[in-house]
Each structure stands twice: as structure tokens, then as C-alpha cells.
Amino acid sequence: MKIKNIVKLSVLCFAFGNLSAQNPWPKTTETAKPWTRWWWMGSAVDEKGLDKQLTTLSKAGFGGVEIVPIYGAKGFENQYINYLSPEWMKMLKFTTNKAKSLNMGVDMAVGTGWPIGGPQVDEQDAATKMMVQTYTISSDEKFSDKIILKDEKQKNLKTVKLDIVTAYNEKNEAVVLTDKINADGSLKWKPTSGKWTIYAVFVGKTLQKVKRAAPGGEGYTLDHFSPEATKDYLKTFDKAFGNSNYGVRSFFNDSYEVYNADWTAEFKEEFKKRRGYDLSPYIKYLVSDNESEISGRIKSDYRETMSELILNNFTKDFTNWAHSKNSKNTNQAHGSPGNLLDLYAAVDIPESETFGSTPFDISGLKRNDEDIQKSDIPDINMLKFASSAANITGKPLISNESFTWLTEHFKTSWSQVKPEAEQIFLSGINHIFYHGTTYTPADVQFPGWLFYASTNFVPENSLWSHLTGLNSYVARTQSVLQSGKSDNELLIYWPIYDQWANPKGKDVAFKIHNIEKWLQPTEFYKNLDRLGKSGYSLDMVSDKMIGEAKLDNQNIQVSKEGGSYKVLIIPQLNYLPESTLKNILNLAQNGASVIFQNEPKNIPGFFEAEKRKSELETLWKSIPFQQNGNLKLATFGKGKIILSSDVEKGLEYLKIEREKLTDTGLKFIRRNFEGGKYYYIVNHTSKEINQNIPLNYIGKQTALMNPENGDSGVAETQNNSVRIQLKSGESLIIKSSENTDNAIPKWKYIEKTEAPIALSQPWNLTFKEGGPELPKSRKINQLQPWTDFTEDASTQSFSGTGVYTTSLNLKKNKADDFVLKFDKLYESAKVIVNGHDAGIVWSLPFEISIGKYLKKGKNTIQIEVSNLMANRIRYMDRNKIRWRNYHEINFVNIDYKAFDASDWKVQPSGLDGEIQLIPVYFSK
């Protein structure tokens, strides 16, 4: 056979790293393993079922569960258990005890369904909104109308009250009339001249109920802006839990999806206390569509107040309550009107969320248009709000609700999950929660109980036996990403006041579903995107964090436990509080380096605006800028300030080195550990990368670590670069340390390959597990999917595992190793060579090392292929077999329409194309 130089198969190096006696991998704890959201449908659980499913999850490589009770299945009502009832608490205690015996953890939601709420939320504590009515009154006409709320839905509510009444004439002169209204709504005021418009603001209720609530969890959603409401809500948990946390690691609060909640009973008083003036004379500018400057200023103050209220009256109180139970708390801040960075920073485990499917350039990655959400694409920079807050404040865990609606139901393979997980990791998140797993009683038939908006990480999934491949990958990666500290060098200020000062609308909610409106069009986002792709590592910082920051050896640090940053970037903006500029200059005075993209011209808010704007201008003029080429530079105390529209030019001047490895298209995230650094590197390009890549840090010893199979070995380094071999879709961890370990052998690089051996001989195809029935066994002359055999109807409906078996006569096996390479695999496979388990092929590229199991002469290769659930679900719907029968939303498709798979195409299943056995040789 002709020997040729290796320019392909660069991934094959992954088959040949080495697990040394001195394993460089951090310990894989329960937290490093993936966790899953665990829906208890109707809380119809029992000890036998809990024991079985926790054991199954543990064997599949899960480290913990997050209990979220939701609506139940029809026909099982007599098995429902009311949320927080003594029986429910008994099931919780059984769960945490069983989990502990399996070295698993348990989190639980502080509520059922979402958003937070329930039967303990009475009318007083329910989500609140302002309700505005307008009237006209003239000096020459009698005003006979009654200023009372006319909304029929609010009529019988006891908490509805009139909060603000203000009249405006045609010159916009205001008269506050709140104390001029009689109990019956009649007005005790008449203008002396002209025509006036009266604005009456009532405290009303949204009347929103908990969505997808479980039995015992139904009721109003909570008023997040009221401290009394939060306190009252948590009393129910105090009663159920007593002085114990029942073994719950962290109490979880889902994303803020409270609609039209734009007020609270004490808002007027809170506004005056926080903003320094009475809102009443200016209420018109808040509630009308007036887009004047004054309207923008009033609305900015309103939005800032709402942000402070949810932070101080809900989020911090929630954290303190969890700590009182000796537990942690987890919170999804997105969707709320608060400053996301401050909200995430106020909890123990900030949690973000991914929704939908990302288009990657990975060669061979499946992404069918008909199976994905068109409107939602996960965005790495949206995820960074949670990781930034955690990195800055030193929180070790950042979690993510992952893979919601990744594809249509039953059509997601583990190879599609992997790059989405990698993007989550690259954002700085290190604690993935799958979305998710549904509890199913032991006697419920396929497909078991299912949640309507998930990737189905359930034991009934025909791909379940291969999930350990994905889970092991996540666990190894997270073991590294949970070690040490984040090593991002730049801080970039989030100019939230540019959002808050927008005169359009009223409340501003920072949702993941509308980032194309509030995030992506901004210069802030464009800087994040551009600098990240250039090889810089950034965290976002808020005004509050800047105010808390200190200098440590000329680096900016908000918390001793948090990251240390070389530069603070102030991106292009319109509004900057004078207090924030003062704090920035104080940092520079003490040694910080700061880059402004433009001169801040304005301050947000209404109170003493001219005075504060003058203070801003005075502070800015105190910076002694000097022109230096295209930059303006200033030495300011011990620090430096640069003014440049081109941030990268400023960073170059400050000698801040970017990681040039991104020039290859590779993506990375970097972490510090004592005595060295980790680099997590991902190839999401369509090309293979087989070269030396530069790193800003190279220690005395650099090891390569393959998170897919756990192999490791000492890398070749040269001139601050390390040699890597990565195919499209692969990832790698580089551990560079000042310490050396001679027990770690060299990493085995592929230098050349011989011509591949095509496995074109006949194969036997049998079926070992699945349904609705096993297709008949057959002998095939060439590899093809079992769904090609349309004469056997069972092949069209079968979901499960088919086994392809063949024999191979190997004339010589002098190569250093052999790699089995698949052409097309639907969807994952376990490979068995001569009776030995060689591993799982589940991610792109589809190939695996099997050399150590081969022998000269006859070899038996067995490939156990599992396909998607889709064909079996299609069969059930075509034959009217009832399997979805739930209360509430029941079960919908990816477009939120009634689910029906009867018209689906049969999904190809099994092996197709050619399988090659490739002899490979390592560098010496």
C-alpha cells in the first residue's frame, strides 16, 4: 500500500492521546456532570418510579436533577400530589435521599410551571399594573364624569385604587389633583380657564395566572416589585420546609415572563425616594406616546426605579431566603425589566437560557429548515450577561437552561446537541441543565410522558443508550471550566441608559426572544462581537459594578473572588450618569486603563438634569487629552485614558495582546488555575486545522486533553505556539502549566496514513431492541439504511437499535493504529470489535480508533446503530394510537400548533455510504 502524508484525518489524533498515570484532568464531581430539568407531571410520582428513574439517570452520567412540577397527564388525576403538601414533601425527601446515595444533587423550583406564583399569592401580592384613563375638562363646562376605574375585569378587585390624578392644559402646565377626588370618584376642582386633559392612574392587577401550573400550584403570578409580596410568597415554603432544606442544593426561579406588570402599590413613593422628585406632575410623559426629551428622561427614571425594585425587593430577598435554608439559589434574570448584570450578580448561580438552533459551518452537521425555529437563534453574547456577572463577582457556577426547541420533537441527535453545548461553554457558562427529562411511571408505555417544549432526554428515547457519550463529553469539559477562575482581560460597560432613555414605550424587558431589537443593533453588541472574533476575552460590567470596583496591581477588580481586568471599555453611547463617569475617573486615577469610544454628551434622568449634565462636562474636561495619531491619549493619575472610535487601536496602544489563534477560525475560552492556564478550543469551521497555533501563554509543560474520550498527552510547542490537529466539529483542551510531570507521555500526532481499507463486503443486519416491532434480520451486500427496505413495513416504523455485523481479514496490522471512519450514520453507534467495546460514535466527524482491538487475520466488527424516535411516533400518529393526552397545552409542535407526525417523511436510519478502516502512523 502506498504511504501518503497526512493532511486529512487530523482529528484522528484524538484517538491517540494518552491517559497518564498522572491524569491531568480535574476530578469529575456531580456538579461537573450535566444536570437535567425534571418535570413532575401532576406530581404523580411514587417512590418506586423515583428510584428507577434516578438510577437510570445516574447510569447515563447525570449529576443532578432540577424538579419542576407542571400540569398532569389525563387519566392519572387520582395519582396527583398537591405541590408542597405533606405527601409531596415526602416524595421530595425520598428523592434527595436517593440522589445522595447515587452521588447526585437535587434542585427544585420555587413554584410550579412559570413564572413564579401560586395559591399563596392573594390579590394584594399579585402582579400589578398601572391602568390609565383620560378625561377632558373645560372652564366653561360642567364635569360630571366620575374618575373611577371602568375596566370590567378589575371591578370586583378590592385592591384597585386611584394612585395619581394630574391635569394638563394646552400649554402643558400641570396641576396634581390626586387629593381632589371624592370617594365616589367626583372631582373637587374646576379650571379657571382653558381646556385641560386629566390623566388618572389606577393601581390594577394583571390577573395573569401561573403558566403550566401543577396541582397545588395554580394561582396569580407574583408582584416582583413588592417586598411584602416576596415575603408572603416564601412563607408558604417556610411552612412546608420548616428549618430544613430537605436536601435541596439550590432553589430555582425560572425566567421572568410576567406580562404587563409595570407598577406596584408603593411605586409612587419609591420613585420619589430613589429619583428625588414626585412623578405625579410628569405622569403624562410616562404614559403617553410623547417622544420628547422630557418623556425620555421621565421614562429613564421610571425604568431605573423598576430595575432597583426587582433587585432589592425580590432578587436579593430570594437569595437571603435560600441562604436561611442553608441552600443556594438559581435565578434566570432575562425577560425582566431589571439590569440583567446586577440581577445575575445578586444570586448564587446565575442562569441563562438557549432557545432554538444555531447555524454552524461544521461539515456534515444536520439542520433541516422544517425542523427548526425560524425566529429564535441562540446568541453567545446574550449568554454572556450571566457569565459576566458571575466572573466579575467570583461565582463558581454559571448555569444554562439548554436545548429548548433545538429541533422538532423526536428529531434531535446527540451530534446536533454537541455544538450547541460548545457555544454555551464558549460564552463562559459551566453548568449545563438539559431541557429536559419528564418523570414517567413504570407502567406507561412508549414514548412515556413528555413535555411539549423540550429536547427529549428521556430513557424512552431510542438514542438513550448512546447518551453517555454526550454526557461524558460535557462532564470532562465542565470539570475544566469549573476549575480555577475566568481569565478574561477586558471589561466592557453596558450602556443600559441608552435603552432606558428611549422615549418610545413604557417598561423595557430584556428578553432573549427580542435581542434583535434591544441588543444586536447597538454599538455595545458590535464591539462584543468584533472583539470576541478578534481574539479578545470580555466580560460586561454595570454602573453598580463600576462603582464597587477597586484597583489591584493596576488591574480592575470588583470582587476579590472575581476576575481581574486590564482595561475598561466604554463603548459608543449617548447617556452616561455623571456618577459613573466620576467612578471611572477614580479608577483611572488609581491606575486603570480606560478606552472611550466617544465623548459622553448627556446624562440620563430628569432630576437636576442641567446641573448633572454640567458636572458630566466638567469631569470630561478634566481629562488632559493629547492627540496621538488617530487616538487621543491622556495620563490620568496613575492610569491612562484613550479616546478612539476604533477600540482595537486603543488596545494595541495599551499593548493588550489578543489571542491570534482566532485567525484560524477557532473559538476559545481561557481559565486561570494555580500555576497555569486552560484553553478550551473549538473548531466550528468547515475545515480541518492541522498546524501550530499561537497562545499568549505557554508554560513549562503543555498538555493536550481530548474531552470526548479523556485522552491526554504532552504537546509539541514552539515559539509560543502549540501543535494541534482538529477536524471540523471537534474540540480540545490545552493545559499549560509552570509545573512539569514527566509521567505524562507525549501526545500522539498523526503523521501519515496508508490507503484506507473499504469495508465493502456483505453485512448481516439484525435488530436487538426497540419497537413497535423488530424488523426481520437480513444479509445485505452493501451498507444501506434499514429504512431502504420498504418491502418490510416494520423498517419504516422502527425506532431502536439495528446491528450491522461483518468480518474482516486483516493481512497485516503493523500500523500504529486503525481508525474506523463512517460516511453516513443515522444517528449514533456503539462499535464492538472482536467482542470488545470500542466506544460510542455520536459526534462529528463520525470516526473511532479501534486498532488495539484488531488482530492479524479474521476480525469481527459489530456496529449497533440507534436511530431517532421520529419513525415510531410517525407510525403511532398514522395509526391513531393515542400517546399525547395531557391537560393544559397538551403537546404541540415546534410552531406551537397541534402536534401530528402522520405526514412526516420516514427518517433515514442506520448506516449508509462507505465505512473505511484507515491505518495511521504517529510522529516519533
Image (cartoon, rainbow, N blue to C red):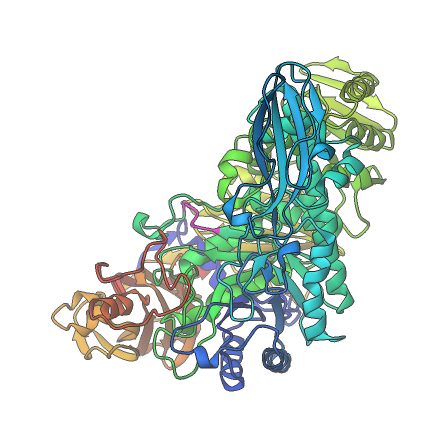
- Magenta stretch encompasses residue 357: yes
**Viewer-proximal residue, 638 or 162?**
162
Q: Can residue 750 be seen in this view?
A: no
Please report the residue visible at 73 percent of the width from the left and 51 percent of the height from the top: 313
Region in magenta: 355-361
Report x, y in % for residue 735: 64, 56
Left or right: 367 as drawn, with respect to 748: left
Left or right: 881 as drawn, with respect to 271: left
**Viewer-proximal residue, 828 or 100?**
100
Report x, y in % for residue 51: 53, 83
Q: Give the farthest residue toward the bottom.
A: 48
Query: Majority secondary structure of the magenta segment?
Result: loop
Q: Give the farthest residue toward the left.
A: 791
Residue 871: quadrant of the picture: bottom left
Left or right: 538 as drawn, with respect to 637: left
Where 749 sits versus 324, above or below? above
Please report the residue visible at 55 percent of the width from the left and 40 percent of the height from the top: 662
Report x, y in % for residue 364: 35, 52
